[in-house]
Amino acid sequence: ALAAFGTAQAQDYPGDKVVTIVVPFAAGGPTDRVARDLAEAIRKPLGATSVVIDNAAGAGSTIGNAKVARAKPDGYTLLLTHVGMATTPVLYRKLSYDYQKDFEYLGMVNDVPMTLIGKPDLPANNFKELREWIAKSGGKVNLGNAGIGSASHLCGLLFQSELKAEMTTVPYKGTAPAIADLIGGQIDLLCDQTTNTTGQIEGKKVKAYAVTTMKRLTTPALKDLPTLDESGLKNFQVTIWHGLYAPKGTPEAVTKKINEALKVALKDPDFVKKQEGLGAVVVSDKRVEPAEHKKFVESEVARFGPVIKAAGVYAD
Ligand code: MLT
């Protein structure tokens, strides 16, 4: 009888109940930006009355991830997160959830490049000068990030390792507060997603040094930025991505419905335009397939795991 009840519920999903997307980072940042735009785009195809965001920020996304892993598996609590899904299992010795077993993978959303930006009064005017400035600083450069396991942390790790320069890292609950402090001059540098930095670069609120892709970007506000690769950090490449997840045990009828709605949302012209304007690329149907996305996450664990281990940074 219970199972029959579950099936009936799944068929009624979502009905008029609120669907919550948990964002494991601060409001106003890049993950939040993608989640809010996606919430708007997916509401109609999902047939939901309302899709809201819950910012459960802290500990490099692991607090929000844990919250969703423990949530009722009924399709009303979802998780929108990024590459942290693949880096946190390597970085954290103790996690209260298992990224492979405690989630239903609903699908991938986008690919997002990153940018290296500095505080407005940083004396360096290009990457070459920045490199010299860092070399002279003796480890005193303050590099912000969104906590261990975040995209900004990963990019910062790779950047320090390529430069062979140690910096003082300053963790925040997201790069929204980090970029605010960068603009205010409290920190010096940040490697953050274009979904958070494009507007600030365009408005000349920060100094922009480079993009983390192998090719220059085509987004108007970012097209003149050199790549780190052409600036001397050969093969430097970090693009990150977002995915959508539900607690393990969410009925298949529900996960299927969400996956189908996600595919429609990712073709919403308004959503696509917003993403492109922020330098991000919405993925094609194939990569939205849950099995395909799960495989991709594993490949990211394999790609970044050794790099992270080599850097020797762990959180408890
Ligand atoms: C990150 O560095 O992982 C992101 O900027 C997180 C965020 O603030 O959304």
Image (cartoon, grey):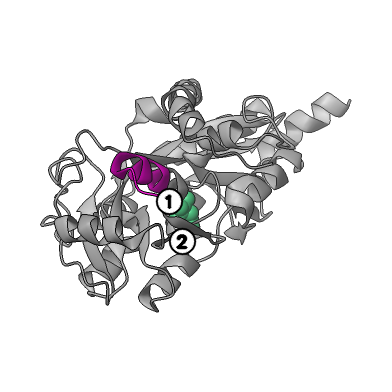
Mark 2 CB near ligand 1 (8 Å cut):
yes
The reply to whether dot 1 and dot 2 touch (C-beta < 8 Å) is yes
User: Taken as a whole, is the magenta stretch helix, strand or loop?
Assistant: helix
Q: Residue at x 50, y 20 (%)?
A: 291
In this image, 182 relative to 17: left or right? left
Name the residue that disc number 1 marks.
Answer: 152
The reply to whether residue 270 is in sight is no
Is 162 contained in the magenta span?
yes
For label 1, count other residues whose C-alpha is less than 10 Å away and answer few (under 14), some (14-19) or many (20+).
Answer: many
- Compared with 134, 229 (above or below) is above
Name the residue that disc number 2 marks.
Answer: 175
Q: Position of residue 18 (x, y in %)?
A: 66, 56
Numbered label attached to residue 315? none
Region rendered in magenta:
155-166
The quarter of the picture where residue 249 lies is top right
Tell me the quadrant of the picture where the N terminus can be found. top right
Q: Residue at x 35, y 62 (%)?
A: 189
Amino acid type indicated by mark 2: Thr
